[in-house]
C-alpha cells in the first residue's frame, strides 16, 4: 500500500467524459489499496481564456486580481473530479489552496510554494478518502490567492507529493512520456524510459512544457520520483509505463545530447546607443529584476566608437509590455532607442554528456547554417546551448537538430 499523488493536466480533464476516465483510473489505484491525492488542472483552454479576459481589461493589470481570475479554472475541475470519484464509489472531497492550506510567496502570477500543511489531509487519506487539490493555486501570507505561473499544477503536485511523503508523483498528460523533443513537432522523437532531474530541469526551463521547471527542482531537492504518463491509455501509474524522472546515478545509459527544447515564449529587447561606461548593465537590469521580470539571454555589442554600444536581451513574451514600461522610466539609461521584437524563439540542445564532449556547439551552428537559419543570440551553460532565432523557423530548426544529433536512433554519438 502506497501513497501516490496523481496529477491530471488540462487535456486530461478537458470535458466531463475525460474527468470520468481520470476518476476511474484513481478508483483503480484505490482498489489496489493505495492512498491517493489528486491534483487537477483547469479544463484545457480555460486558463488561456481567463488570461485573455484580464489582458482585455488592461495589459498592465493588477496581478493580485489576475490570480483570483486565473485560479478559478482549477476550482471548477477539483469539484467536478470529487463528484466523479463519488459517482464511481470513491469517497472524495476537494481542498482549495487556502483550505489545505498551500502557503506561497507574495510574487503574484509566479508565486513559489513555501509550505503545505498536511495534517488534515493525512487524516482523511488514512480514513480512505481521496483528496482532490486544484493545482496552480495557493494562498499568500497576506491571505490572498496566488498562482504559480503557467504550467504550475505540475509544481503543486510534486510539492504535495514531497509534503505528504508520497512514494511517487504521477503526471498524467496527453503524451505517454518525456521524449527527445516535442513529439508533436518531430514524430520520430524517441521516448525516454528514464531521465535525470538535471536534464529534465534544463529541458523544462528551455521550453519543454511537459513539466514545469519548478516541479522538477522540487522533485530533485526532495527526491520525489516523477512519472510522466498518458491519461489516454488504459493503464494506471502503478503499472509504471511512462518516463521516470529520477536521480542521475539511477540511469545506466547516458547520451551526449539527450534532447532538443524550444520556446516561443520569448521577446527580444535592444537598447540602442547606450553609453559604454561602467554601470550601464546595472541601470538596465536592476529595475527589471526589482519588477520581477526574468531576463534570460544577454548580449552586449562591441562598441564601434568606444563611446556607445547596443545591449540585447530576452524576456518572457508575456512580460514584454511590463519590461518596456520599466525601461521607459529609466531616463538616465540614455539609450537612443529601445527596439523590441516578439517574433523570436529559443531553440536549445541539452545533454549532461556535453560536459565531456566537444563539437556539440559547432554541430548546432553548422546544422542551422545549412538550413539558412540566422542566429540572433547564443547562450551556453555546462549542459546546454541555446540560440535565439526567428520564430517562423523554430520547427525546421528543431527537426534538423533532432536528426543531426541522431536522436531518433539509439546510441549514436555526436
Ligand atoms: P498538461 O495540460 O497535461 O499539463 P502540457 O501541454 O502542459 O500538458 O504538456 C504536455 C505537452 O508538452 C505535450 O503535448 C507536448 O506537445 C509538449 N512537449 C514539449 N516537449 C516535450 C518533450 N520533450 N516530451 C514530451 N512532451 C513534450
Ligand atoms: N491551468 C494552468 C495553466 O494552464 C496550470 C496548469 O495547467 O498546470 O497554466
Ligand atoms: Mg502542463
Image (cartoon, rainbow, N blue to C red):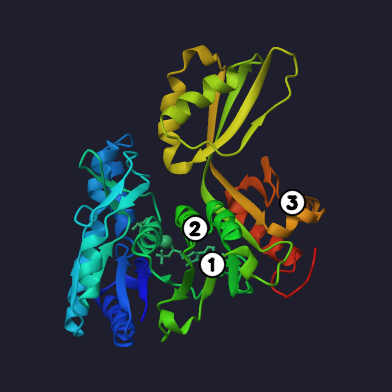
Q: Is the CB atom of the residue marked by disc 2 within 8 angstroms of ligand 3's nearest atom?
A: no
Q: Is the CB atom of the residue marked by disc 3 within 8 angstroms of ligand 1's nearest atom?
A: no
Residue at mark 2: 216
- Camera-near label (1 vs 3) is 1
41 sits to left or right of 188: left
Q: Secondary structure at mark 2?
A: helix
Q: Is residue 288 above or below residue 35?
A: above
Distance of label 2 from label 3 (alpha carbons)? 35 Å
x, y (%) of residue 345?
Answer: 57, 48
Distance of label 2 from label 1 (alpha carbons)? 8 Å
Q: How many other residues sit within 10 Å of disc 1, few (<14), some (14-19) or many (≥20)?
A: many
What numbered label is drawn on residue 245? Answer: 1
Q: Is residue 288 visible?
A: yes
* Disc on the earlier residue, 2 or 3: 2
Is mark 2 in CB contact (under 8 Å) with mark 1? yes
Report the residue at 53% width, 23% height from top: 284
Q: How many other residues sit within 10 Å of disc 3, few (<14), some (14-19) or many (≥20)?
A: few
* Residue in front for this viewpoint, 296 or 275: 296
x, y (%) of residue 44?
Answer: 34, 64
User: Which part of the image, by quadrant, shows the C terminus?
Assistant: bottom right
* Disc on the earlier residue, 1 or 3: 1
Amino acid at each position: 500500500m502506497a501513497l501516490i499523488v496523481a496529477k491530471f493536466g488540462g487535456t486530461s480533464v478537458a470535458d466531463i467524459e475525460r474527468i470520468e476516465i481520470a476518476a476511474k483510473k484513481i478508483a483503480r489505484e484505490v482498489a489496489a489499496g493505495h492512498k491517493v491525492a489528486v491534483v487537477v488542472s483547469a479544463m484545457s483552454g480555460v486558463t488561456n481564456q481567463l488570461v485573455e479576459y484580464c489582458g482585455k481589461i488592461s495589459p498592465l493589470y493588477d496581478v493580485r486580481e489576475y490570480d483570483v481570475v486565473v485560479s478559478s479554472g482549477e476550482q471548477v475541475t477539483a469539484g467536478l473530479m470529487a463528484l466523479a470519484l463519488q459517482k464511481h464509489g470513491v469517497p472524495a472531497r476537494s481542498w482549495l489552496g487556502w483550505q489545505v492550506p498551500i502557503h506561497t510567496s507574495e510574487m503574484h502570477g509566479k508565486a513559489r510554494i513555501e509550505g503545505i500543511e498536511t495534517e488534515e489531509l493525512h487524516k482523511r487519506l488514512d480514513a480512505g478518502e481521496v483528496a482532490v487539490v486544484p493545482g496552480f493555486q495557493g494562498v499568500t501570507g497576506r491571505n490572498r490567492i496566488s498562482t504559480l505561473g503557467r504550467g504550475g499544477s505540475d509544481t503543486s503536485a510534486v510539492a504535495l507529493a514531497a509534503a505528504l511523503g508520497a512514494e511517487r508523483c504521477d503526471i498524467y498528460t496527453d503524451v505517454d512520456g518525456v521524449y527527445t523533443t516535442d513529439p508533436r513537432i518531430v514524430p520520430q522523437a524517441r521516448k525516454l524510459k528514464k531521465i535525470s532531474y538535471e536534464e529534465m530541469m534544463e529541458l523544462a526551463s528551455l521550453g519543454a512544457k511537459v513539466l514545469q521547471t519548478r516541479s522538477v527542482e522540487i522533485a530533485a531537492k526532495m527526491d520525489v520520483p516523477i512519472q510522466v504518463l498518458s491519461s489516454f491509455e488504459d493503464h494506471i501509474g502503478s503499472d509504471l509505463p511512462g518516463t521516470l524522472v529520477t536521480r542521475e546515478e539511477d540511469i545506466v545509459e547516458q547520451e551526449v545530447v539527450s534532447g532538443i527544447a524550444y520556446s516561443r515564449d520569448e521577446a527580444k529587447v535592444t537598447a540602442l546607443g547606450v553609453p559604454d561606461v561602467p554601470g550601464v548593465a546595472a541601470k538596465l537590469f536592476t529595475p527589471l529584476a526589482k519588477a520581477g521580470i526574468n531576463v534570460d539571454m544577454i548580449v552586449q555589442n562591441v562598441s564601434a566608437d568606444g563611446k556607445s554600444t547596443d545591449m540585447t536581451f530576452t524576456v518572457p513574451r508575456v512580460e514584454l509590455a511590463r519590461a518596456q514600461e520599466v525601461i521607459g522610466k529609466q531616463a538616465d539609461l540614455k539609450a537612443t532607442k529601445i527596439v523590441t521584437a516578439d517574433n523570436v524563439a529559443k531553440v536549445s540542445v541539452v545533454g549532461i554528456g556535453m560536459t565531456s564532449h566537444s563539437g556539440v556547439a559547432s554541430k548546432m551552428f553548422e546544422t542551422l547554417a545549412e538550413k539558412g537559419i540566422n542566429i540572433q543570440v547564443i547562450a551556453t551553460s555546462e549542459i546546454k546551448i541555446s540560440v535565439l532565432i526567428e520564430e517562423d523557423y523554430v520547427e525546421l530548426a528543431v527537426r534538423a537538430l533532432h536528426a543531426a544529433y541522431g536522436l531518433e536512433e539509439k546510441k549514436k554519438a555526436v
